[in-house]
Image (tube, rainbow, N blue to C red):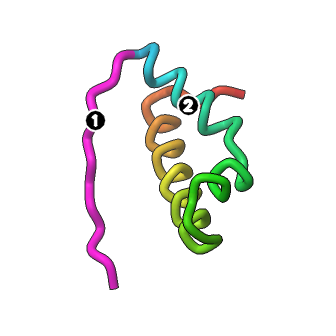
Amino acid sequence: MSEIQTISPELTPEQCLAFAQFLKRVSFSDYYENAVDKDEAYTMMAAGEEIRAALREVGYAPR
């Protein structure tokens, strides 16, 4: 089992909003295009959703 890692980037409000917008718009095909295989694409997508949730918790949840 993998150990959970915590990251704490320091972002400007503009960076938070821009990245939240990106994560809202990115799709599985975008992850898949940049992954070595389907499993890695799903792993990347799951990480993106975790970051999206963290951004939402601090007020960056674009519609």
Q: Which residues are magenta?
A: 1-12
Horizontal and vertical percent position of residue 43: 53, 66
Q: Amino acid at mark 2?
A: Ala
Horizontal and vertical percent position of residue 26: 68, 41
Horizontal and vertical percent position of residue 42: 60, 66
The residue sitting at 55% across, 51% down in the picture is 49
Magenta region's main secondary structure? loop
Q: In the displayed image of the protein, which residue is found farthest to the bottom?
A: 1
**Label 2 SS:** helix
Vertical arrangement, residue 14 with respect to residue 33, above or below: above
Q: Nearer the viewer, residue 49 or 41?
A: 41
- The tag earlier along the polypeptide, 2 or 1, is 1
- Can you identify the residue that label 1 sits on? 9
> Which disc is residue 35 wearing?
none
- Can you identify the residue that label 2 sits on? 20
Q: Quadrant of residue 28?
A: bottom right
Q: Quadrant of residue 6?
A: bottom left
In the rendered image, which quarter contains the C terminus?
top right
Vertical arrangement, residue 43 with respect to residue 20, above or below: below
Q: Amino acid at mark 1?
A: Pro
Number of numbered discs on residues: 2
Dot 2 crowding, Cα within 10 Å, few <14, some 14–19, many 20+: many
**Label 1 SS:** loop
